[in-house]
Image (cartoon, rainbow, N blue to C red):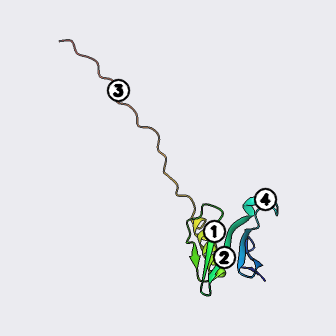
Amino acid sequence: MTEVADARFELRKVVGYEWLILDHRYEVNDPRRTVGCVYQVDEYEVEVSWMREIPLARRYMTPLDALQELLRFENRSRSTRPIEIPHQPPLMAPAPTPSSPL
C-alpha cells in the first residue's frame, strides 16, 4: 500500500510493519531520497528514525501522522518570505575642528 499525501513526499510500505518516507526531489538512487524509516512499536505507536536533521518527534500514533507532521514542518519553514532589513547609508563622521593655539 502506498499513500501519497503530497507530490514531493510519499509514505511507502516496505513490509508488514515498516514504512519509508521518501522525498521525490531526489533520484531513486540518491541516499537523500529517504527522509525517514517508520517502524511499528505496538498497536497504537510507531517510531521514526529521521535520516536528516529534522526537529520532529520520534514517536507517533500512525505512520500517516509522522508524514503529516513532516508536511506541516516543511510548509511552515517555507511559509514566510525573508524579512527585509532596511539599509541606510553610513553615518558621516563629524568634520574635524581646527585646533586652537594655547
Kindly identify which numbered label has been placed on residue 30: 4
Q: Earlier in the sequence, mark 1 or mark 3?
A: 1
The earlier-in-sequence mark between 4 and 2 is 4
Helix or strand or loop: what does disc 2 sit on?
strand
Relative horizontal placement of residue 93, taking residue 60 as reference (left or right): left
Closer to us: mark 1 or mark 3? 1
Please tell me which residue is depicted at 34% across the width and 30% down the height of the picture. Answer: 94
- What residue is pinned by disc 2? 39
Q: Which mark is residue 41?
A: none
Assign the C terminus to one quadrant of the image.
top left
Give the spatial CA distance, label 4 vs label 3.
62 Å
Q: Label 1 is placed on what type of residue?
A: Ser
Occupied quadrant, residue 41? bottom right
The quarter holding residue 101 reads top left
Q: Is residue 70 left or right of residue 17?
A: left
Of marks 4 and 1, the one in the foreground: 1
Percent from the top left, x then y, of residue 52?
A: 64, 61
Q: Secondary structure at mark 1?
A: strand
- Tell me the residue that label 1 is attached to: 49
Disc 2 and disc 1: Cα gap in Å? 8 Å
In the rendered image, residue 66, in percent from the top left (x then y), is placed at: 62, 76
Separation of residues labelled 4 and 2 (CA atoms):
22 Å
